[in-house]
Amino acid sequence: MTPDRPRRIQRGRRSAAGRWAGLGIALLTALAAAGCGSGTAGSLPSPVPTSRVDLPRSYVFSPAHIVVPAGTTVTWTNDDVFTHSVLLNGQAGLGQVIHPGESTTITFRQPGTYHYVCAFHPQNMAGWVTVVPAG
Ligand SMILES: [Cu+2]
């Protein structure tokens, strides 16, 4: 599930990114607790059936919401000129860091809707993976 690629510290920006990630998670938690009006599910972009998420220039996951059957390995490819990451809700640290030109993968085995952000730019970069039962 987790690639063997070592995590590298990002040119001294690690602590700042960590603070932003913490803030983003706190904000999302607060929004979830508040119920957020008409409900979070209705506000998600429509899910696209694909296992590949691109990170084009600049600061987006495309498509932002995908849907896959359980057991699918999802690949994120960073085609931006900045380093990003895939940090699943509830994960600590930076998640899986993706340098420009690189990819990372996560295999989703349990159905559900998984929210993630880029730990470096959580205020701009968010995505969702909806996993439906296989077959
Ligand atoms: Cu980013």
Image (cartoon, rainbow, N blue to C red):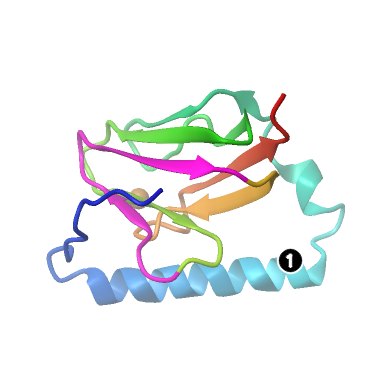
Give the answer, above or below, for where 31 lies relative to 116.
below
Question: Which stretch is magenta?
Answer: 92-109
Place residue 78 in its image quadrant.
top left
Left or right of residue 110, residue 8 in this image: left
Tell me, yes or no, whether the highlighted magenta stretch contains residue 102: yes
Residue 53, percent from left and from top: 44, 31
Give the answer, above or below, for where 72 lies relative to 116.
above
Q: Which residue shows up at 70% across the image and 44% down it? A: 111
Give the answer, above or below, for where 93 lies relative to 111.
below
Label 1: how many residues lie within 10 Å, few (<14), some (14-19) or many (20+)? few
Residue 37, percent from left and from top: 85, 58
Does the residue tagged 1 have its C-beta within 8 Å of any atom of ligand 1?
no
| Nearer-the-camera pick, 118 or 129 | 129
Label 1 element class: helix
Place residue 133 in its image quadrant.
top right
Q: Which residue shows up at 52% across the image and 52% down it? A: 116
Place residue 10 in its image quadrant.
bottom left
Q: Residue furthest right?
A: 38
Residue 56, percent from left and from top: 34, 30
Tell me, yes or no, whether the highlighted magenta stretch contains residue 125: no
| Nearer-the-camera pick, 108 or 75 | 108
Left or right of residue 3, residue 117 in this image: right
| Quarter of the image with the C terminus in it | top right
> For the residue marked with disc 1, what is the amino acid?
Ala
Residue 50, percent from left and from top: 54, 23
Q: Which residue shows up at 62% across the image and 66% down it? A: 28
Left or right of residue 114, residue 4 in this image: left
Q: Which residue shows up at 41% across the image and 48% down it? A: 1
How many tags in the picture? 1
Q: Label 1, on which residue?
A: 32
